[in-house]
Amino acid sequence: MSLGRARHQRCRRWGALALASLLGTAVVACPADARRRHHRYDPPSASIVVDANSGKVMEASNADSPRHPASLTKMMTLYLLFERLETGKIKLTSELPVSAHAAAQAPSKLDLKVGQTIDVATAIRAIVTKSANDVAVTVAEAIGGSEPAFAKLMTAKAHALGMNHTTYVNASGLPDDHQLTTARDQAILGRAIQDRFPKYYHYFSTRTFVWHGKEMRNHNHLLGRVGGVDGIKTGYIHESGFNIVTSVHRGSRHIIAVVFGGRSASARDARAISLIANNINVAAAKRTAPLVVEGWETKIARPIPKPPVKPAIEQKVASATPLPAPAPPVAGSTDPIKPVPVKTITVEPGTIHTASLAPLPSASRKLRPAPATANPAKITTIATVKSEPPALVKPAVAEAAKLAAAAPAAPVKAAAQDLAAKPRGDWMIQVGAFDVENDAKERLTVAQNKAKAQLGDASPFTEPVAKGDKTLYRARFAGLDKSQAATACKHLKRSDIPCMILRN
C-alpha cells in the first residue's frame, strides 16, 4: 500500500472515531479532501447565441469579456487556408512540408516528422478532428512563411471581419497570454466561414479521421448527437476551460452558439445543448442579415458611392442593364469555378444596344456609334448613356443611321428593341462579390446553370464598386419581379450559392 493511500485511510478512520465520540458535533476533514475542494477547477465563462438569419443576438453572458480561444484559433487558420484554395494558390492535393518548429509542437498532434509532407485535404481533416497542433503550424508556415508572420495575417483578417477584440500570436491556440478573443468575435467567425466558404465548410462536420490506420474521432461530441449540428470547432487550455463554437441548422432556422469556460467537456456540451434548445425554435426562418464578409460592419454604416459613369462606348461589356444604385453589404465570394463568359450582346453593324432596357425618351439622350473595328461584320459592344441637350440628339441618331447604311445587306438583329419590348421587373439578386471580374462572371454562369427555370430571362451583369484602394466586382441578375427574385434566391441558397434580393 502506498504511503499516501495509507495516510488517507488513517484519516478516514480517525474522522469516523471522532464523529462517533462527539455524537456528530465535530467533523474531521482529511487534508487530501480539503485540497481537492480548495482547488476546484472554475475557469471564466462566457457564451452567446446569434441568429444567423437575422444577425440578432438571442442570448449572451460575458460575450465581450476577453478569453483565450485555445483550439478555436484553428478556425481562423482554416479560414486563411480556404482563401488560398478558393483563389487557386493552393490545391487540396498540394503537399505541405513539415519543419522542425512544426514537428516540435505540443500535443494534440499527429507526430509529424521533420522533412515529411502532408497534403492539404488531409491537413484540413486532421485540424478539424484531431485538432493537431503540428499540422496547424505546417499550414501556417506554408501560407505565411513563418508562424509569427501568419499570426499577423490572422489578426488582420479578424479585424477586417469585425472581430475587433481578437489577437492571434500562433496558429494552434497553444497557451499564450497575448492570444485573446471574445465569445462575440468567435460567433462572427463561425458565421463568416459558412457565408464565405460553403464549398469547404462541410469539413467541419467530419466525425472521424484515419491517419496511418488509426481512427481519430472529432472532439465535437454534439455532431450526430444533437439534431441539426453541423460543426464547427472545440478547444481547451487550462486558462480558458473547455470551449466550443457550434452551428445548428433545423429547417430554415440557423443559429451559432458559443460557450467558453466549461469545467469539463461534458459540462461545456450540456451548456451548449441548453442554449440550442432555448433558442433554435424561436430563431428567424428567413435570411435577412447580410453575409458576414470583410468590412461588412463598415458597409452597413456607410453606403458605398456609385462609381462614375463613363461617357464613351466600351468594347467589351458584361452588362445588359443599368448600373444599379449602391446596395446593402457586399456578399462574399465562395467556390472558384471554371471561367465561362457572361452573356454579352452581339449586334450587327448599325445596331447599338444601350445600357437601358426601356425605350429612351425623345430628345433626352445621345447614342454614340461604335468605333470602327478591324472586322466590321461583328462587334460586341454597349453604349453608356449620358444626358445631352436636345439639339445634339438628331446628329447622333443620324451618325448611327449612316453606320447602318454602310453595313452589308443582311438581316439586322434588333436586340435593344426586343429587350425594350419585354416587360422587365424592377428587382435584382446578388450572388457574390469578388476581387477579380472573371470570378464574378464565373459565379453568374454557375448560378445560371443552377437556377435556369427560376431566373428565366434575367440579365446577368457585373458591377465594379470601390472599396478603399481596391475594386470589387458584384455578380448580379437584373430584370426580375419580387416573387421571381425571392424564388431564385431560395433555390440558389439550397445549392450553397449565397444570394441577396435588391430593389433596382
Image: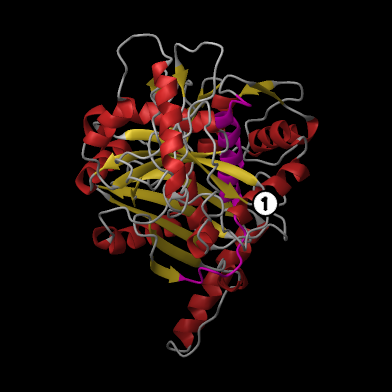
Q: Amino acid at mark 1?
A: Ala
Q: Quadrant of residue 139?
A: top right
Q: Is residue 92 above or below residue 283?
A: above
* Residue behind mark 1: 156
Left or right: residue 366 versus residue 495 is right
Q: Is residue 137 at least partly visible in the picture? A: yes
Foreground residue among 498 and 227: 498
Residue at x-position 67% and y-position 30%: 111
Foreground residue among 168 and 320: 320
Residue 397 lies in the magenta stretch:
no
Foreground residue among 25 and 338: 338
Left or right: residue 109 versus residue 379 is right
Residue 66 lies in the magenta stretch:
yes
Using a 10 Å C-alpha cutoff, classify the residue at mark 1 as few (fewer than 14 neighbours), some (14 to 19) or many (20 or more). some
Q: Quadrant of residue 48?
A: bottom left
Residue 346 spot, x, y in % from top left: 40, 20
Q: Is residue 261 at least partly visible in the picture? A: no
Foreground residue among 419 and 39: 419
Residue 20 spot, x, y in % from top left: 45, 83
Residue 366 spot, x, y in % from top left: 44, 40
Specify start and end residues of the magenta stretch as a single range: 61-90
Q: Classify mark 1: helix, strand or loop.
A: helix
Residue at x-position 59% and y-position 46%: 76
Residue at x-position 52% and y-position 10%: 375
Residue 348 spot, x, y in % from top left: 39, 17
